[in-house]
Image (cartoon, grey):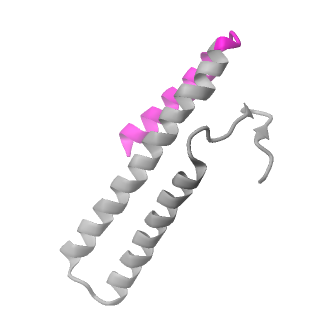
Amino acid sequence: MSDDTTPEHGPHGYSGDKAALLGRLRRIEGQIRGLQRMVDEDTYCIDVLTQISAAKSALHAVAVGLLEDHLAHCVVDAARAGDPSAKVKEASDAIARLVRS
């Protein structure tokens, strides 16, 4: 989707370095492919679990970075516009999902 606007969320984008974000996600994708290879090659279970933990940590770091960006831009912009409550609720829900995972 090339449009950076959705009716329910308004204008949005990645104010940080989008290329860096995509690079991190591609590295994580490589980790997952490596995990598939490890399972296919009957790698020792503990080694596979260690790599799963690393992939989860990498995804968590991406999620936290996106959340920080959302708070710094989307929520702040909504507060300046005088209607932050929906964005604060949205961010709170996202934080709750991250904490549960």
Measured along the vertical axis of the image, is residue 101 above or below residue 67?
A: below
The residue under the point 56% across, 32% down is: 70
Question: How far across and down, in percent of the image, does residue 14 sit?
Answer: 62, 41
Up/down of 9 relative to 61, above or below:
above
Which one is nearer the viewer's eye here, 17 or 6? 17
User: Residue 11 appears in which quarter of the rendering?
Assistant: top right
Quarter of the figure with the N terminus:
bottom right
Measured as percent of width and height from the top left, residue 15 is found at 61, 37
Which residues make up the magenta segment? 80-101
**Which residue is rendered at x = 52% and y = 53% of the image?**
20
User: Residue 61, position in %: x, y?
Assistant: 39, 47
Which residue reaches farthest bottom? 41
Q: Is residue 33 above or below residue 17?
A: below
Location of residue 84 (image quadrant): top right
**Residue 54: within the magenta?**
no
Left or right, 39 with reference to 92: left
Residue drawn 72% across the image and 33% down it: 9
Tell me the quarter of the picture where residue 78 sits: top right
Relative depth, front residue between 93 and 25:
25
The answer to whether residue 26 is left or right of residue 15 is: left
Q: Nearer the viewer, residue 31 or 85?
A: 31
Question: Magenta region, mostly helix, strand or loop?
Answer: helix
Which residue is depicted at the point 53% across and 52% down?
A: 21
Q: Is residue 83 left or right of residue 26?
A: right
Inspect the magenta stretch and tell me whether residue 86 lies in it: yes
